[in-house]
Image (cartoon, grey):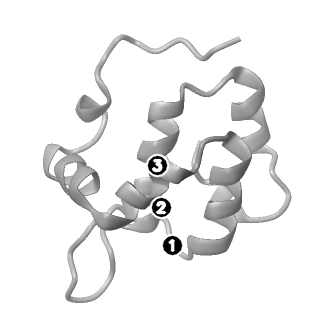
Amino acid sequence: MEIQTCGKPIDSLLEKVLCMNILSSDYFKELYRLKTYHEVVDEIYNQVDHVEPWMTGNCRGPSTAFCLLYKFFTMKLTVKQMHGLLKHPDSPYIRAFF
């Protein structure tokens, strides 16, 4: 069963500037190669080390975590997948996504 949304487009759920930066980021474009829920979860486990919208330091691009979050928005997760994220034992960063 697919999660029902409130009908709002993805870009209205996040700050507009953040969405534009995510969509234009090289990292987000690389995420097109990830086709399954499990591949994205593995990417979170391997790449995410903080859950903030923007990169730390002088570079003000979107964070890895928020690029992956946007990727999940585009995948239309099921209820079972959402529960899997909430109860995932491997990383607190995976649980932080929902």
Q: Amino acid at mark 3?
A: Tyr
In the rendered image, the quadrant that contains the C terminus is top right
In the rendered image, the quadrant that contains the N terminus is top right
Tell me the element at label 1: loop
In the displayed structure, would residue 5 be above or below residue 40? Answer: above
Q: Residues within 10 Å of mark 1 (few under 14, many from 20)?
A: some
Residue drawn at x 52%, y 40% as measured from the top left: 72
Farthest front residue in view: 33
Q: Amino acid at mark 2?
A: Ala
Q: Which residue position is annotated with label 3?
A: 32
Query: 21 left or right of 98?
Result: left
Tell me the element at label 3: helix
Tell me the element at label 2: helix
Tell me where residue 59 appears, x and y as whole percent: 22, 83
Q: Amino acid at mark 1?
A: His
Tell me where residue 63 appears, x and y as whole percent: 37, 67
Q: CA distance from mark 1 to mark 2?
A: 7 Å
Q: Residues within 10 Å of mark 3 (few under 14, many from 20)?
A: few
Question: Of marks 3 and 2, which one's residue comes earlier in the chain?
Answer: 3
Query: 63 left or right of 60?
Result: right
Answer whether residue 68 is visible to the viewer in this image: no
Q: Residues within 10 Å of mark 2 (few under 14, many from 20)?
A: many
Q: Which residue position is annotated with label 2?
A: 65
Q: Which residue position is annotated with label 1?
A: 50
Q: CA distance from mark 3 to mark 2?
A: 15 Å
Q: Which mark is in front, 3 or 1?
A: 3
Tell me where residue 54 appears, x and y as whole percent: 30, 68
Residue drawn at x 63%, y 14% as measured from the top left: 2
Q: What is the number of the mark on residue 76? A: none
Q: CA distance from mark 3 to mark 1?
A: 22 Å
